[in-house]
Amino acid sequence: MVVMKEMLLDREGDAIAPKDYTVVTTEADFLRLALSRQPLFIRGARLCDWAEAFCYARGIVCTETYSFKRELQSAFPTLASSQIDFLAQRLEMKAEILSRPLTFWGILQSIYPVSLWTQAVSLRHAATWLVWLQQTAPDEKIHPLLIQACQSWENLAPISLRSVYSVYSTPAAQQLLDEWLGIVESERTWEEFPIEVPLAELERARKIWHRRIIESHGAFFKNFVNLKVPFSLKRVAAQETCQYYLLHADELSKDIIDQLSPYLSQAELNELHQYAAPSIPENIPASPDAVLAWFREQYLPYRQWQHRSDAAQGREVVLKSARQFADWYLNCYPKALSSSDPLWKWLSFNRSAQLAQTENLLTLLIVLDGLHAADARYLLNIIRSQTQRLTIVADDFAFAPLPTVTEFAKGALFRGVAPDKIDAVGDIGQVLPDNQSPAQRLQAIQQGLYLWRVQEPDSTYHQKNRSENLLLDVEGRLQAEALKIKQIVELVPDGVVMQIVIASDHGRLLGKSTRTLFAPQGLQIHGRAAWGDFSKVFPASGYLIEDNLVYLFSESFGLIHNTIIPLDESSFRMADERGGSELYPHGGLFPEEVIVPWIVLARDFVKPSVEISLSGSGKARRSGKLQVKVLNLGEVSLTIQDLVVNFRSGRPIELYLDESLKACSDWHKEIEIENWPAPLEVSSANAFARIRQPNGLVFEYQVEVSLESEDIYVRPDDILEDLE
């Protein structure tokens, strides 16, 4: 006799068939398979009735399967049948593994497996929610569950974010996202968008602003730049404005270029400067900080314009300014080595030595080989476009040691001393491998100074010097380094206080140099510098100028060897006396070769999103109780240092708290006050609190105050009332 295995009956037609069962959906298949040894899964109400009668007559076991649709309807009774069908279809392959009882959180997590559903309410979460809605465009049939999620978040959100959590459809999300990003005008005041702006939104902004820039004759950017929006959006607006002025050069001015310059690449600025040349640099000032300002505001813009336009008259101006700088540096540098000149504190190797003295901080000094000022501006713009977590603490310059070649300048930076002393001391921090990103290694580091040398962009400048796309190749390498820096920022744990210092060992000549100079026999040569043993009678200044060459005495200039540097744009012939030319060489004394970037970036420097309230009641001149409540809306743990309550009498209540505030959490504390203020005092009270970030930065916040006081000596309106 043939023994048949169990039949499973799926009347609703929505159950999931076990792997070893054969699904039967027609009468013909049922008749063919009914008495086989195969376990059968019967689908459909009519066929199940027939199968059930067959099994009853034959004594075969049959079992009803559960209906997932029925389970969904029971869990979400307000959903329409079309919505239940939609959920059942989307969850068909996951129905068995869903957690029970069914919840809207579990359903959403299963259909859309993203971290949104498990993250706490915060500014970052709200921004992520809008972007997700805009990009995902969830089906309208899922809206009832999204509404439940929004209501849950809205109940926990501060007032400033509730409008974001009231949105659950893609069109509404797009509108709110446009307002937050400044793509369209908004009457609301927004905090800066805390996550990376999607590329699609950048392009959307570009198209919308294109019209507004034309209609405003370029004036749109003047007001837009003051909005609290991410750098990437300001860069888009600046680029579109730049394109407008390139087509309307008669409307362009130096002030407009100055306003656009922080957001444009050097190539874009060069194009603008074709129509509005920078002012001619004034004579070089005397103090180092004034020289750096002169370099940034006068010399560098003019030098870049001259290099781009190749104007003969402009070259004469540049040569004059460069010679003034060389004379100034040659006179100040030897004295600065003995700390007897203000230049000392601006020397790059002295600035790196100061980094070793910082405590309770993770400092990463990134030395990009041969990064000149214009390239540093491009790199910084890319970094600011890619991450919101780094804030510019210092965008400065420093003076490199002589000669401006890696062999000496890199060692000076890493050891914090002049080149002649690098063999006598060790590195100021732990040196990381050159050829790999330190992101993974720094994950386990809490504090200390780490040094990472990146061989770009110098490697590209040398290897592709004759390429027509040299500058594009350099920009490509800088973009790659910016991505590595972003990875470091993301992988180092949030609790670590971290700063990143971007520096360079030397700059580069902005232009082409011809190899016309012969160095004395036996000297080593690199570009615009030659060094070795040669005899000269040096004056007290330590340098000697002959035929547009400056000879440096090693002992005066902190060098290992006597050195020769040209004072014009020339270079030395190569060891085999080959001539030719080289683009963007280094080793000389031009301002752009000596003055190098010194950029300090602090992670999570922005003011944390925190709400603080103070309430309480008591009887005047007796004890009372204060309730302090703090809502930390950010994703970084904080500390509330203290809270001060000010009264009209001038006698404040000072509370030293030093309490930890976990990320995305609320904290409250009740504090007893012995001498409670009088009603008139509390009516005019105000308070502020200080919040400290893990990186040691302290921010001050206004506190919402709601205090009550009962005076025990209240005089009745009728002074005879108590006698009745």
Image: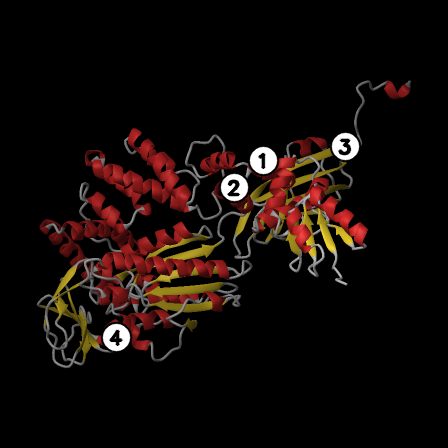
Mark 1 vs mark 3, CA separation in Å: 41 Å
Under circle 2, the secondary element is: helix
User: Residue at label 2?
Assistant: 133
Quick check: marks 3 and 4 in contact, CB under 8 Å? no
Image spot of residue 377 (x, y percent): 31, 53
Circle 3 Cα neighbour tier, 10 Å, few/some/many (<14 / 14–19 / ≥20): some
Front position in the image: 140 or 85:
85
Could you tell me how far apart the alpha carbons at marks 1 and 4 are, in whole angstroms?
67 Å
Q: Which residue is mark 4?
A: 559
Label 4 amino acid?
Leu
454 up-or-down from 64: above or below? below
User: Is the Cβ of the residue at disc 1 closer than 8 Å to that at disc 4?
Assistant: no
Q: Alpha-carbon neighbours of circle 4 within 10 Å: few (<14), some, or many (≥20)?
A: many
- Dot 2 or dot 3: first in sequence order is 2
Image marks 1 and 3: residues in contact by CB distance under 8 Å: no
Left or right of residue 388, residue 10 in this image: right
**Residue in the picture at 49% in, 64% down:** 362
Indicate which disc residue 710 carries.
3
- Residue designated by label 1: 166
Q: Residues within 10 Å of mark 1 (few under 14, many from 20)?
A: some
Three-letter code for the amino acid on which mark 2 is drawn: Leu
Structural crowding at the residue carrying mark 2, measured as other residues with C-alpha within 10 Å and reported as few (<14), some (14–19) or many (≥20)? some
Please state, as top left, top right, bottom left or bottom right, where the N terminus lies in the image. bottom right
Residue 375, quarter of the rendered image: bottom left
Q: Earlier in the sequence, mark 2 or mark 4?
A: 2
